[in-house]
Image (cartoon, grey):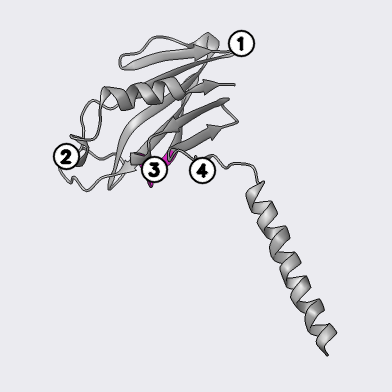
């Protein structure tokens, strides 16, 4: 009877150990929080990663297909009902636009970030801020996002 209990407890502990190891060594997901508190957004299909500040907690993404490009729109929650909301209760601080290289053209508001053999990457940041972001958003935050973008 005592040996049976030892085997059961040992089995349960081994199971927890295996689950724990899988958790620790798992591949980071596209929206994981990094050790320094920022959000790592990775889009393998479009070939880029970007870090978003900790203030972007609860962010959501949406993709839109255009003529010769694809937009990845980043949304963050807002309580500002006067703010022009494309998605209810969310503001759009950032758009990452990935052009097919032969369809690329400069567009107002978009900053070209880089290119590969077949794609051109550009970012657009919001101009109008929701009330709760008027004290939070800064050029430093914008530059942090710009400088964190990596093109694969």
Q: Nearer the viewer, mark 1 or mark 3?
A: 3
Residue 32: which numbered mark, if any?
Answer: 4
Q: Nearer the viewer, residue 18 or 70?
A: 18
Residue contact at pointers 3 and 2, CB within 8 angstroms: no
Residue positioned 51% across, 43% down in the render: 32
Residue that lies at the very extreme toward the front in this rendered image: 2
Residue positioned 52% across, 22% down in the render: 150
Q: Earlier in the sequence, mark 3 or mark 4?
A: 4
Q: Earlier in the sequence, mark 1 or mark 2?
A: 1
Residue 117: which numbered mark, if any?
Answer: 1
Q: Magenta span has 57?
A: yes
Q: Mark 3 sits on what residue?
A: 59
Q: CA distance from mark 3 to mark 4?
A: 11 Å
In the rendering, at what x and y percent does residue 78 appear?
25, 45
Q: Mark 2 sits on what residue?
A: 131
Write the start and end of the magenta stretch as one range: 56-61
Secondary structure found at label 4 = strand
Residue 40 in the image: above or below residue 15: above
Q: Nearer the viewer, mark 1 or mark 2?
A: 2
Residue that lies at the very extreme toward the bottom in this rendered image: 1
Residue positioned 69% across, 53% down in the render: 21
Q: Nearer the viewer, residue 48 or 100?
A: 48
Q: Earlier in the sequence, mark 4 or mark 2?
A: 4
């Amino acid at each position: 009877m005592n040996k049976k209990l030892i085997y059961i407890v040992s089995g349960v502990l081994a199971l927890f150990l295996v689950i724990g190891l899988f958790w620790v060594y798992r591949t980071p997901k596209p929206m994981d929080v990094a050790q320094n508190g920022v959000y790592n957004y990775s889009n393998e299909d479009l070939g880029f990663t970007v870090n978003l500040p900790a203030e972007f907690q609860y962010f959501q993404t949406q993709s839109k297909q255009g003529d010769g490009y694809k937009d990845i729109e980043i949304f963050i929650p807002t309580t500002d009902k006067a703010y022009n909301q494309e998605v209810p209760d969310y503001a759009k601080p950032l758009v990452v636009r990935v052009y097919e290289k032969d369809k690329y053209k400069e567009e107002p508001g978009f900053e070209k970030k880089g290119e590969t053999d077949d794609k051109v990457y550009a970012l657009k940041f919001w101009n109008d801020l929701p009330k709760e972001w008027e004290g939070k958003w800064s050029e430093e935050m914008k530059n942090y996002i710009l400088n964190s973008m990596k093109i694969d």
